[in-house]
Amino acid sequence: MNKEHIVKFAIPMLSLGLAVLLNGCSSFINRLIVRSIERVGDPIEPPPQSITNPILDGPEVAVSWVGHATTVVQIRDKVFVTDPLFTNTVGIILKRLVLPGVDPSLLEKVDYTVVSHTHFDHFSFGSLDMLPKNGTLLIPLGALQYTPEFGFRKVREMKPWDVEEEDGVRITAVPVQHFSGRYGIDMAWMRDHGYTGYVIEYGGYTVFFGGDTGYHDELFKEIGRRFKVDVAILPIYPGSSGGLGSRIHVNPAGALKIFQDVGAKYMVPMHYSTITYGSDAPPKQPLEVLKKTAEEAGIAHKIVALDIGEQKVIFGKNGVPASSSE
C-alpha cells in the first residue's frame, strides 16, 4: 500500500478503532477492516443493467435499485431517493462491488431525499452533493449537526412519528431498531436516536422504506396498524443467519417478518450485493435465501427482486399491479 492509501485510510481506521474500544473487541469490525484493505485494489464491476431513463412518464409506482439502500421511487409525478450512495467507496474504507445502476446526473429533479441514519454507507456527503437540490432533504433526529450546507431547498430533521407534508406528499418518520453515530466515539450518545424509517404517501399509494434495522416485535406491527402499505423496501443483509437476524440487522427471514407485520402488498429487497462488510459469501446469497424462504411461506409472488440498475413498474396505469420479478 502506498503513502496515499495510508493517509486516506488513517482517519476512518481511527474512527473504527474508537468504535472497537468503546464497544468491545468485535470480530465483525476486525474482519471488515482486514478484508477492506485486502480488496483496496480490486476493480468495481459494472452494474448488471444501467437505467438511462430513471424518471418515467405515467407510472403509478415504479422503483429503481441503484445498489445498497439506494432506490429511486417514483409515485406518479413525484420522485424520491432513499439513502443515496453513488460514490465508489464508503468512508474511504469500504469499496463497493458494483457501480451504481443510475447516474445521478440523469435525475432532473428529486422531490424528496430521505436519509435513514448517519452511518457513512447511508449518509454519504459526496453522494448527496451529486443530487439536484430542488427538493427537500429529510434526516433523522440528531443528524442536523453532521449535515453540511448542500443547498437543498429545505432540510428537516425528523423524530419518530413526525410528519412532513407538502403538495400532496405526506412523509412520516417511523421507528425502527438500529443505532447511529458516525465517528466511533459519538456512538456513546447516538444509540437511541439518529435512525429512522419513512412512510411515503402520495397519490393514493404508500411506500415504506425501512432503512437499516433489526426486527422488533411491536414497532412494525404498529406501522401496519397506522398505514395501508403498498410497497415495503426492506434490507436483507448483513443480519446473522440464525433466527430473524441480529438486533440491528435483519436477515431475509427477519425482512419477511417485517413485510408481513406492516401488511404490505409487495416487498422490494435491498441492502445486499453492493458492500460485503468483510464477508466472503456470494453477494447474491441473501436474495437466494429470501426467495427460498418466501416460496416456503407461499408469498414468493409478492417479492419484487431487482438487479442493480433495474427499474420496475410495480403499479401501472389505473393502479394495475405488475407481476413480480422472477
Image (cartoon, rainbow, N blue to C red):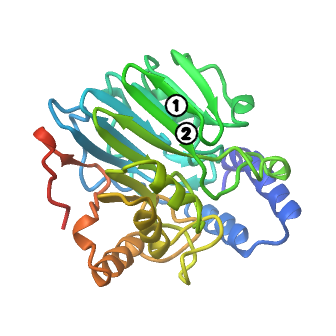
- Asked if 14 appears above or below 140 in the picture, the reply is below
- Asked if 148 appears above or below 241 in the picture, the reply is above
| Count of numbered marks | 2
Left or right, residue 241 beside residue 178: left
Q: Which residue is mark 2?
A: 115
- Asked if 305 appears above or below 284 in the picture, the reply is above
Please state which of residues 173 and 129 is positioned toward the viewer in this rendering.
173
Q: Amino acid at mark 2?
A: Val
Per the image, label 1 sits on a secondary structure element best described as helix
Residues at marks 1 and 2 touching, judged by CB atoms closer than 8 Å: yes
Question: Neighbour class for label 2 at 10 Å: few (<14), some, many (≥20)?
Answer: many
Residue at (50, 53) in percent of width and height: 223
Of the residues tagged 1 and 2, which is closer to the observer?
Answer: 2
Residue at (46, 71) in percent of width and height: 257
Q: What x and y, as percent, mark residue 111?
A: 40, 25
Left or right, residue 59 beside residue 269: left
Q: Which residue is mark 1?
A: 128
